[in-house]
Amino acid sequence: MLKPEFKWESIRVGQVVGERDLTVTPEMVAAHCEGVGTDRDWYTGDSPFGGPIAPPMIFMNDVLQIIDESFQRFGTIHAKSGYRFHRPVHVGETVHEKVVFKDLYVKREKGWMVCEMEVRGKEEGDLIATYLHTSVLSLTRKHGEETK
């Protein structure tokens, strides 16, 4: 099945971009820790939360991965991010990720999109983390319009 093209005209506020379930594995945690250069004991052994937990930023790239799963490859310029952590995620826990377009606006003749990803515990449905991702994307020129 051909994925829709990722362009300004094909996205709308409130649109669910994608959802997925993901089990946090020790291998995922190890790869993340290696990538960011951390080795906190809580990520591999005991923690005050009852066993190993994942680093809070382990899901930071998932917004873009979910967009890639739902649309043809897109190009944006990352502008800013915001994160809110509600509770740690345990290694071995399954979470549910959901990405929604929260805002679309034009500023300085560029299209801006704000995506929000909620990460919830699969079992309880409780909120683990909220990630906001803002990017600039080119406004698609309509047929017949001339470039400036």
Image: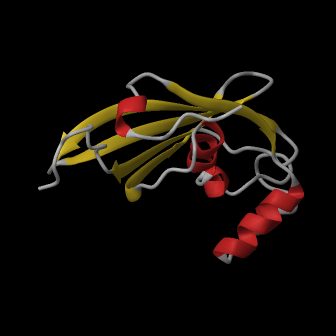
Which quadrant: the N terminus? top right
Q: Position of residue 39 (x, y in %)?
A: 75, 74
Name the foreground residue: 141 vs 44: 141
Question: Looking at this rendering, what residue extends furthest in the left direction?
Answer: 148
Residue at 69%, 45% (x, y): give it. Answer: 88
Q: Quadrant of residue 58?
A: bottom right
Residue at 79%, 60% (x, y): give it. Answer: 29
Q: Quadrant of residue 34?
A: bottom right
Which quadrant: the C terminus? bottom left
Color encoding of the figure: secondary structure
Q: Position of residue 44 (x, y in %)?
A: 85, 63
Residue at 72%, 65% (x, y): give it. Answer: 32
Q: Position of residue 37 (x, y in %)?
A: 67, 78
The answer to whether residue 44 is above or below residue 9 is: below
Q: Position of residue 14 (x, y in %)?
A: 43, 22
Q: Is residue 126 left or right of residue 109?
A: right
The answer to whether residue 60 is above or below residue 41 is: above
Name the foreground residue: 30 vs 70: 70
Question: Looking at this rendering, what residue extends furthest in the front direction?
Answer: 144
Q: Quadrant of residue 78?
A: bottom left
Q: Is residue 107 left or right of residue 93?
A: left
The answer to whether residue 81 is above or below residue 21 is: below
Name the foreground residue: 19 vs 129: 19
Callout count? 0
